[in-house]
Amino acid sequence: MANRLKVLLVDDHALVRRGFRRMLEDEPSFQIVGEASDGQEAIERAAELHPDVIVMDCALPQVNGIEASRQILEKQPNIGILMLSMHSEDTLVRQALDAGAKGYILKNAMDLDLVSAIKRIAAGNTVLDPQLTRGHALKGERDAGLTPRELEILQHIVGGKSNKEIALELKLSVNTVSVHRANIMDALGMHKTAELVVYAIRNGLVSLP
């Protein structure tokens, strides 16, 4: 099958990698191009294999998954990285998204659907584990106070769309969308899109696709 998604699996446990491989090999649109067992090896394998998506364990020996992601994306920004972790702490999620990961899901999730998550990331969407968005409002942060139009634009931002794509969708000018985006971030006290996405989902400001 032409144009299959090239996937690199990174986990320090061989049994886990084998399990993920079995889950993914049945999907005809995927090609598992390689595996790595630590962060440094992941960096090297990514440079060698040019995968479309990397399934990256967060807790890796030598170089952790977040730092490995940062180094990989500095050289290959088009790779989509799906972070897998046993931990749901806000700080870790923020660090992973700030490093450039497009998704963060919990390894112990009973309904872990890797195939769907990888496809969504390859399509440019952000994927967050539903467990991270339940009852997790961050203490001390302001209420949204956003207009209906701003909430509509926020929904598209969370969907991974660019200002140009949002403008086309809503029949607005790119400049108008840029102003709305700046107003949203200012209203919520955010400085990075990754932070905005996490906050919006966690506080129920948008509906997950």
Image: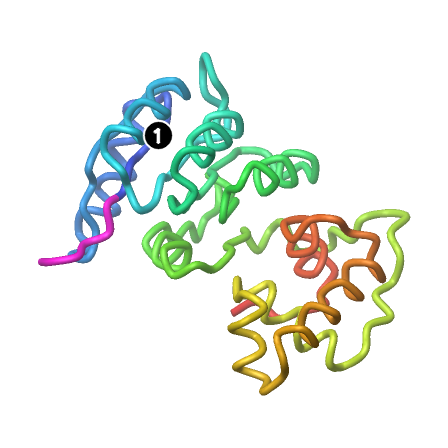
Q: Residue at x 54, y 65 (%)?
A: 162
Q: Locate residue 25, reporting x and y percent.
A: 18, 46
Give yes or no for residue 37 being in the magenta stretch. no
Front-lying residue, 199 or 147: 147
Q: Is residue 154 left or right of residue 24?
A: right
**Protein image colouring:** rainbow
Q: Locate residue 124, reporting x and y percent.
A: 43, 59
Q: Which residue is mark 1?
A: 10
> Residue lying furthest bottom in this view?
171
Q: Locate residue 49, reporting x and y percent.
A: 23, 33
Q: Is residue 27 above or below residue 168?
A: above
> Residue lying furthest top in this view?
62
Q: Locate residue 174, reporting x and y percent.
A: 62, 74
Give yes or no for residue 4 being in the magenta stretch. yes
Q: Is residue 45 above or below residue 166?
A: above
Dominant secondary-structure state across the stretch colored magenta: loop
Q: Is residue 22 left or right of residue 83?
A: left
The region drawn magenta spans: 1-6
